Amino acid sequence: MDETLRDRITINPAICHGKPCVRGLRYPVEWLLDLLSAGMTHAEILEDYDDLEDADILAAVTFAARLRQA
């Protein structure tokens, strides 16, 4: 995992049952992907969740794509 993903995507057994999350904020990567697949735009997600950043969304998508390649 490159440095950007390490900074943005965290895995902690005490947070969300160890699922990959955005910066330990209890926003699982899979949840963000669900929002995007349901049709929400980056802007809509950022508007609804003030503590998220655009780079968080991009990191979640990148993380999922890399898992798919593995």
Image (spheres, helix red, strand yellow):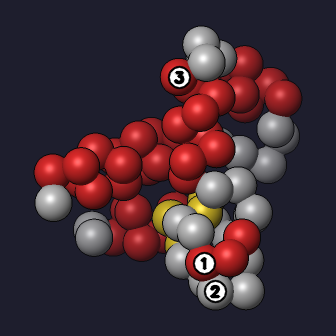
Task: Name the secondary structure under disc 1.
Answer: helix
Task: Name the secondary structure under disc 2.
Answer: loop
Residue type marked 3: Ser
Instruction: Tell whether 35 sits left or right of 61.
Output: right
Residue at 64% in and 44% down = 31
Instruction: Say whether disc 1 or disc 2 marks the residue closer to the N-terminus.
Output: 2
Residue type marked 2: Pro
Instruction: Say whether disc 3 or disc 2 marks the residue closer to the N-terminus.
Output: 2
- Image mark for residue 13: 2
Q: Using a 10 Å C-alpha cutoff, classify the residue at mark 1 as few (fewer than 14 neighbours), some (14 to 19) or many (20 or more).
A: few
The residue that disc 1 covers is 18
The residue that disc 3 covers is 37
Give the x, y percent position of residue 53.
Answer: 64, 43
Give the x, y percent position of residue 50.
Answer: 83, 40
Residue type marked 1: Gly
- Residue 57 in view of the camera: yes
Find out whether the residues at labels 1 and 2 contact each other: C-beta distance under 8 Å. yes
Residue at 55% in and 52% down = 29
